Amino acid sequence: HSLQEASSSASRWVSARTFMSTKEALEELKEMGYSNVCTCFTQSSKSLYRCSLLQDKLALWVGNEFAGLSDVAISAADVELYIPMRGMIQSLNLSVAAAICLSEICRQRSQENDGERWTLSQEEQQKIAAAMQYRRRGFRENVSKEKRARMEKTWSYLVQQSTKVEGPLAHAEVKYE
C-alpha cells in the first residue's frame, strides 16, 4: 500500500521514496550511513526492549504480519529484533508493530543522558515547518485539481445520463399544446 492509501494526511508530513528493490534501498541507506533495524523472528533476533536503538541514523524495517520481511532485508540488518508477546498469536499488524517500535525508540532517546541530542533546535524546527508548509500548499493544490477533475467528470456523466431516454418511452413522441 502507498502512504496515501494508508493515511490521507500522513503524506503531508512524511518524506517517502519508492525503490525498485530492497537491495537498491539497502545500498542507498548504507551510503547515507543508516543502521538497518529489522523486525523478525530469527535465532539472532533480540527482544525490542533489550536492543539499543540510539543510532544517529536508524532505518526501521517492518514486514507485514503474514510474509514478514524478505531474506534480503533481514540478512542486511545491523539489528534484528522482535516484539515480545504473550499468548498464541505471535504477529501484529504492520502499523501496530511500527508504532510499538517507534515508541520504544522515542522512549530510549528521551531517557538517554544526552537527551538534548535528539531535540531539534529552534532553527531546525523553523526549517522543517517551512518545508511542511510548502509541501502542504502543493498537496492542497494537487487535491484541488483532482477534486475539480472528479467533479467535472461526474458533472459530464450526469448531463449525459440526463439526456438519455430509455425504456418504453424512448421512441414516444411528446407534443406540447
Image: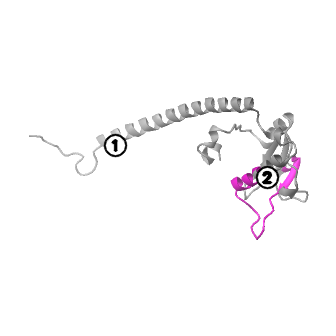
Q: Is residue 75 magenta?
A: yes
Query: Closer to the N terminus: mark 1 or mark 2?
Result: 2
Query: Which amino acid, by three-letter code, is at mark 2?
Result: Glu
Q: Residue at x 70, y 38 (%)?
A: 16
**Quarter of the figure with the C terminus:** top left
Residue 84 image position (x, y, % from top left): 81, 62
Disc 2 target residue: 104
In the image shown, does 66 or 4 lie closer to the viewer? 4
Left or right for 56, reference 161: right
Disc 1 target residue: 161
Please identify the quarter of the rendering in which residue 161 is found: top left
Left or right for 171, reference 26: left
Q: Residues within 10 Å of mark 2 (few under 14, many from 20)?
A: some
Query: Which amino acid, by three-letter code, is at mark 1?
Result: Gln
Please identify the quarter of the rendering in which residue 50 is found: bottom right
Question: Does 7 sit above or below residue 47?
Answer: above
Q: Is residue 51 magenta?
A: no
Look at the image and give the residue range highlighted in magenta: 73-102
Left or right for 74, reference 124: right
Residue 33 image position (x, y, % from top left): 86, 36
Residue 147 image position (x, y, % from top left): 48, 37
Q: Residue at x 76, y 36 (%)?
A: 120
Farthest left residue?
177
